[in-house]
Image: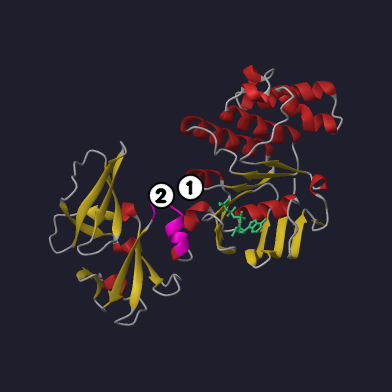
Amino acid sequence: MATVQLDQVNRKFNQVTAIEDITFKIPDGEFWVLVGPSGCGKSTILRSVAGLETVTSGQVFIGDRLVNDVPARQRDVAMVFQNYALYPHMSVRENIAFGLEMRKVDRNMIQERVLTVARSLSLEHLLDRKPKQLSGGQQQRVALGRAIARQPQLFLMDEPLSNLDAQLRDDTRAELKQLHQQLGITTIYVTHDQIEAMTLADKIVVLNRGRIQQIGDPQTVYASPANEMVATFVGNPPMNILAAIYKGENFDINGQILAIPSDVQTKLNLNPGQNVNLGIRPEHIHITPDLSSLVVEVKVVEPLGRETLIRASLPSSSTLLNIQVPGGMRLHPGEKLNLQLDLSQLFIFDHNTGDRIF
Ligand code: ATP
């Protein structure tokens, strides 16, 4: 097991800066998840740690060892990618055992470890098949099994569950979490999936355009985002953003007035007339009979069972609000709703920079 440290790491591809000034230190045994929009540099960071990419500047350490010039195969990392590359001529058993045989591990020990890993990933009945006799999801689990069997000092995973169907993805995610709890091997994990990020991570690293926006445990990043990008990226459905003008005792949202309670007013350090972006999560908007509140028109109703997701628009505005209401509530497109925003849960972002100002 090992710590991983990146110190001011940059990677440029000709004119394109893929990652810039990346600095963090992962303590031994922690599970860190890299998230961010497509092209933000997640894979480049992972590949730099793996040794598949040479960094343009900065330092990469695994444990105490500076690995900038260490070839990939000497870094003792196991990688699992979206495009799992299994050895086609080998059985599942041989694929999982391969890394151990290369290291000349005792035969009985190999058999035992292959079985344990296969059992934990529900692959026991497939051990004698060849990769082409497996579904995509099964192949992906074999790739995971092969990485796990090696017990390296570091796991690097790039969307390892992306080819699994919804149910298998949920199950495998839980298995991964359990495996991490058992093995405690330091892991860097790239995903687009909010649930994976929130449930697996000790720390989430949010990236945008090659730069770190925030590092924190999932709950902190969710409850206390550093800026508008993080606020809207973490959380599903995403946080609502409303352009508003601060008027002292209220916000003017596209001509509608949102009164600011006096206890919130005293905490705000804004100038009257200032343009701001208000941020409010879907679960902090409630339907109210109070006619003086914010009026919206229902556009789309998406029943999800336990709750229903509503998309609604403000009059003469293209902004769609995400609102979460209890599952039993019957609402229809075209219906007008009065909304109460829980202002104790309000975020305010600078209109120009997106920095969080409240
Ligand atoms: P995705 O979520 O779509 O997989 P990502 O966050 O993993 O994206 P990277 O693959 O790390 O993003 O790419 C970061 C940036 O670097 C992108 O702008 C990409 O186009 C660029 N890039 C990556 N690899 C190369 C390369 N070999 N040559 C040129 N540009 C590259």
Residue bounds of the magenta highlight:
229-238
Do we see residue 224 in this rendering? no
Q: Residue at x 49, y 57 (%)?
A: 220
User: At numbered mark 1, what does the secondary structure look like: helix, strand or loop?
Assistant: helix
| Type of amino acid under label 1 | Gln
Instruction: For marks 1 and 2, give the CA distance.
Output: 7 Å
Residue 192 spot, x, y in % from top left? 52, 48
Above-or-below relation of 136 to 42: above
Residue 275 spot, x, y in % from top left? 33, 76
In the depicted view, which residue is nearer to us: 93 or 114?
93
Residue 113 spot, x, y in % from top left? 74, 26
The quadrant in which the N terminus is found is top right
- Please indicate whether residue 121 sits to the left or right of residue 100 in the image: left
- Please indicate whether residue 235 sits to the left or right of residue 332 in the image: right
Above-or-below relation of 171 to 17: above
- Residue 194: which numbered mark, if any? 1
Q: Residue at x 63, y 21 (%)?
A: 133
Above-or-below relation of 141 to 41: above
Label 1 CA crowd tier, 10 Å (few <14, some 14–19, many 20+): some
Res 207 quadrant in image: bottom right
User: At numbered mark 2, what does the secondary structure look like: helix, strand or loop?
Assistant: loop
Q: Which residue is mark 2?
A: 236
| Mark 1–mark 2 CB contact (< 8 Å) | yes
Disc 2 CB within 8 Å of nearest ligand 1 atom? no
How many marks on residues? 2
Res 157 quadrant in image: top right
Residue 112 spot, x, y in % from top left? 75, 22
| Type of amino acid under label 2 | Asn
Q: Residue at x 21, y 64 (%)?
A: 316
- Please indicate whether residue 45 sits to the left or right of residue 321 in the image: right
